[in-house]
Amino acid sequence: MDRVRSILWVLFLVGGISSVILGWIPISTEQTSWDGPLLENNQSARVEIVKFLLSSRVEIDYLDNRGKKIDTENRVKRVLDVYLQKVPKIAPFLPRSYRDGVSSSTGDKEAFPFQMYLLTISPLVVLAVPRPRAEYGAYCSGGIFSTGIIPSAGMLLDCYAYLAKPKIRPGSFWFSPDLGITGQFLPEGKSNYSINLKGSRLDLIANGDVWSVQRHIVTP
């Protein structure tokens, strides 16, 4: 009887491990029609959805113009959320429960005075724009892909918006975990502003009360 129990236990363990392994095997990939964040040459990343065998796991990727997949959870949201604590103008407004990119409680959340705009990926560049209390959460509702937002696990109830046009407001600044920039203010009163990237240039051009964001390839 003990031998039978041992065999059944081994089969149970092997079956469980097999299910876990099989659960990481992709079975379908769907390239959607949704626009992702801005890439160089003014192109938009495509949103790709990957489903896995014997699992409810779904992976959301951005597909860049070179066919490279960028994991939205680990390479975008996770990287940005962890970097928030290094941005001096943002760190004081993170929830007290914030730890290494994740917050566990909205009850201890300070009023977050910035709307975050993901200007581009590869590299990640975010523009933080001051906002009045009446606009809190205004850009973080609706469909995630149709409205172009990435919910934050660090800010809680806030997000990174990549389709909405950033508002032109005094006190705006940008940061980038990929470039090691923790905060560069945009000069007030200017109608354009440029951020030099490797092989390209990110341009913010005033259009009324919002910025039009473009990214051009720069040839040596």
Image: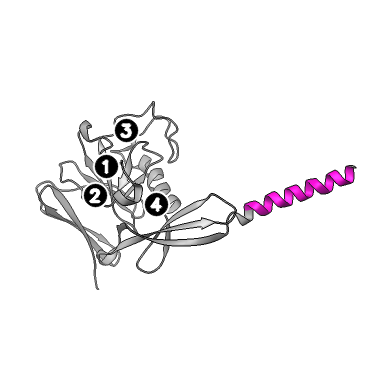
Mark 4 to mark 1 CA distance (whole Å): 18 Å
Q: Amino acid at mark 4?
A: Val
Residue 215 picture quarter: bottom left
* Residue name at image x 15 percent, y 43 percent: 169
Would you name the residue on which mark 2 appears?
Answer: 164
Q: Quadrant of residue 27?
A: bottom right
Image position, residue 16 (x, y; %): 69, 49
Q: Are marks 1 and 2 in contact (CB under 8 Å)?
A: yes
Question: Which residue is at the far bottom?
Answer: 220
- The range drawn in magenta is 2-20
Q: Residue at x 74, y 47 (%)?
A: 12
Q: Amino acid at mark 2?
A: Ala
Amino acid residing under circle 3? Phe
Q: What amino acid type is highlighted by mark number 1?
A: Tyr
Q: Which mark is residue 76?
A: 4
- Whole-number angstrom distance, CA of label 2 to CA of label 4: 18 Å
Sequence-wise first label, 3 or 2? 3
Q: Which mark is residue 93?
A: 3
Which quarter shows the C terminus?
bottom left
Give the crowd class for mark 1: few <14, some 14-19, many >=20 residues within 10 Å.
some
Mark 3–mark 4 distance (CA, rounded to whole Å): 21 Å
Q: Earlier in the sequence, mark 2 or mark 4?
A: 4
Residue at label 1? 139
Q: Is residue 10 magenta?
A: yes
Choose between 61 and 130: the one closer to the eye: 61
**Mark 3 / mark 1, whichever is N-terminal:** 3
Q: Secondary structure at mark 3?
A: helix
